[in-house]
Amino acid sequence: MDKSRPREIDYSLSELQMTALAEELGIGELRKVRLQGALKPLGKRDWRFTGHLGATVVQTSVVSLDPIVNRIEEDVERSWIDGLAPVTADESETPEDVDQEPLGDRIDIGAVLAEALALAIPDYPRGDDEELDQTTFTEPGKEAMSDDDAKPFAGLAALRDKLSGDEDE
């Protein structure tokens, strides 16, 4: 078999794999998880995957605590580069190209699927018609601080407006 020929990828998860990945990601349930695309040689030793991830994710709403069903549709791109040094530090700067990985002895499409899905699921899921109400608290007799007041340049903008108003008088 020619190791340098392009390969079509059509990877779907079994029920058992979806259950295990949902547990690992800390979400309620996964349905219909599929990664499709092409893995092609890039130069003499490097590889490039371009494809599409589709998955149905069931999470708990952060507003109502009801189950929320979201459909994930994400384009996925990864490159495996021969000789690229792996990041080994506990803390490091994010590389310029986050889609590049060192080329090892194998390419794990399942790991690509899991990482792409983990990055695509909503951090704070809520239903389309759900919104957080704004509640303000303050001491009796004082005006509550609003979100606009907390913005870093709100005070400067108010001062600018006040000064420009004084100049017009």
Image (tube, rainbow, N blue to C red):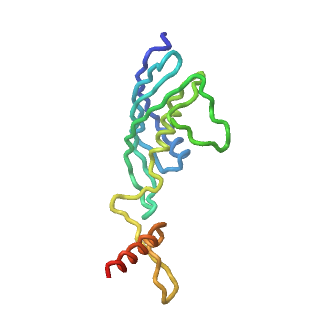
Q: Residue furthest bottom?
A: 141
Place residue 104 in its image quadrant. top right
Can I make out residue 147 in this image? no
* Quarter of the figure with the C terminus: bottom left
- Say which of 104 and 57 sits in front: 104
Query: What residue lies at 40% left-to-right and 22% top-to-bottom?
Result: 8
Can I make out residue 12 in this image? yes
Location of residue 154 in the rendering, given as x and y in whole percent from the top left corner = 44, 70
Query: What residue lies at 53% left-to-right and 28% top-to-bottom?
Result: 108
Location of residue 65 in the rendering, given as x and y in whole percent from the top left corner = 45, 62
- Say which of 2 and 102 sits in front: 102
- Say which of 32 and 118 sits in front: 118
- Say which of 128 and 142 sits in front: 142
Place residue 101 in its image quadrant. top right
The vertical placement of 81 against 52, above or below, is above
Location of residue 44 in the rendering, given as x and y in whole percent from the top left corner = 51, 15
Location of residue 20 in the rendering, given as x and y in whole percent from the top left corner = 54, 41
Count of picture labels = 0
